[in-house]
Amino acid sequence: MRRILALIPLLAAVALVAALAWPIIEGRNPQELPSVLLDKPVPAFDLPALTPGEPGLASSDLKGKPVLVNVFASWCAPCRAEIPRLMALAGEGVTVYGLAYKDDPEATRRFLDGLGNPYERIGVDRDGRTAIEFGVYGVPETYVIDGNGVIRHRHVGEVTDRVADATLVPLLGELAK
Amino acid sequence: MTRALLLAILLLWSPPALAVQPDEVLDDPALEARARTLSAEVRCLVCQNQSIDDSNAELARDLRLLVRERLVSGDSNQAVRDFLVARYGPFVLLEPPKTESTLILWYGPAALLALGALAVVVTFARRRKSTGPAPLSDEERRRLDALLADDGDDNGRPA
């Protein structure tokens, strides 16, 4: 009995190390934060279009079918890198909306002219206030919004093939049912 | 000498590097003071171990401006905090709020200290209770007295 009791501190230490090591082994990025808006309706916003005459982006546009909302900027390198991947998704029939974060519309237009435009609608968020409503803390960020306008997933960082294939596409497919 | 003096003066003269830009500062000093206090409590989510008051990140500047705007529009400090937490989660506050999930964080160290203190007290109490070496028997006492009385010239050294 005594001997078993003496083992308790050792076991406690092992348990502590295991608990602390778990997130590292799991490969969780501590800088990546879960969105507090998860499973909540998108915040209300109404943003002007990038080009006059084209549709802008408002929260009311996010109802009806599951969509991706991609927060991007021409000055952000990973945004540039993920455009081909978003183009491919759009080609597969995914509706991708863009939120141009703190960017000069002229620069955004040049950016999309050069790389291609995957966005069905683009809202220009020049002062970044709408992004703050979403809890955006760095571009690019990609949100999966279901047909009821509820935020179902947030991906922080570039949309890589892996992210698209393992997370975004399956989730969109599930939401479309 | 003059050069050293000049350097010292320049170093002493240098103002602290503030992230808050002059154009952000509010006209009302009381509101500005509240804004500074609040900003020091709010985490910059780009450079996560700095407050927005310290950070030069764009988002930090936007949040500083937002905090000031809300204060000007009449929000209380708590209302501003709630506004930010509703969008960025409790992580946005540098001092985590006391909730169920942060109980260990807040009271864990004190609990560990209390446990340690308890262990020390128990150990000492046990040690005091345990009897020391057994008292000398009559035979031993007689031999000791004989040895002490025999104050010979051997200086206590064995023969």
Image (spheres, coloured by chain):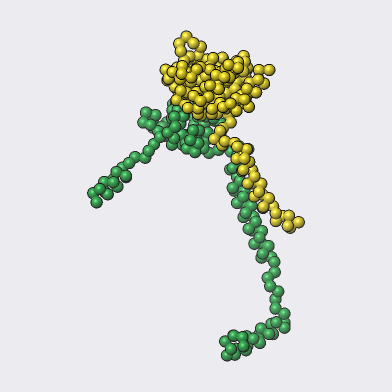
Q: Is residue B70 left or right of residue A17?
A: left
Task: Give the quadrant of residue B142.
Answer: bottom right
Q: Which quadrant is the C terminus of chain A positioned in?
A: top right
Image position, residue A138 (x, y; %): 50, 29
**Figure check: A20 above or below A33:** below
Outermost residue toward the right? A1
Q: Residue at x 69, y 52 (%)?
A: A8
Image position, residue A60 (x, y; %): 56, 14
Which chain is drawn using yellow?
A
Q: Is residue B142 visible?
A: yes
Q: Residue at x 44, y 22 (%)?
A: A103
Residue A127 vs residue B113, the one in the foreground:
A127
**Figure check: B8 above or below A6:** above
Q: Is residue A66 left or right of residue B8?
A: right
Q: Residue at x 55, y 21 (%)?
A: A86
Task: Give the quadrant of residue A87.
Answer: top right
Q: Is residue A151 visible?
A: no
Outermost residue toward the top? A53
The colour one sees for chain B in the rendered image is green
Image position, residue A72 (x, y; %): 50, 23
Q: Is residue A13 left or right of residue A82?
A: right
Task: Give the quadrant of residue B125.
Answer: bottom right
Q: Residue at x 45, y 25 (%)?
A: A75
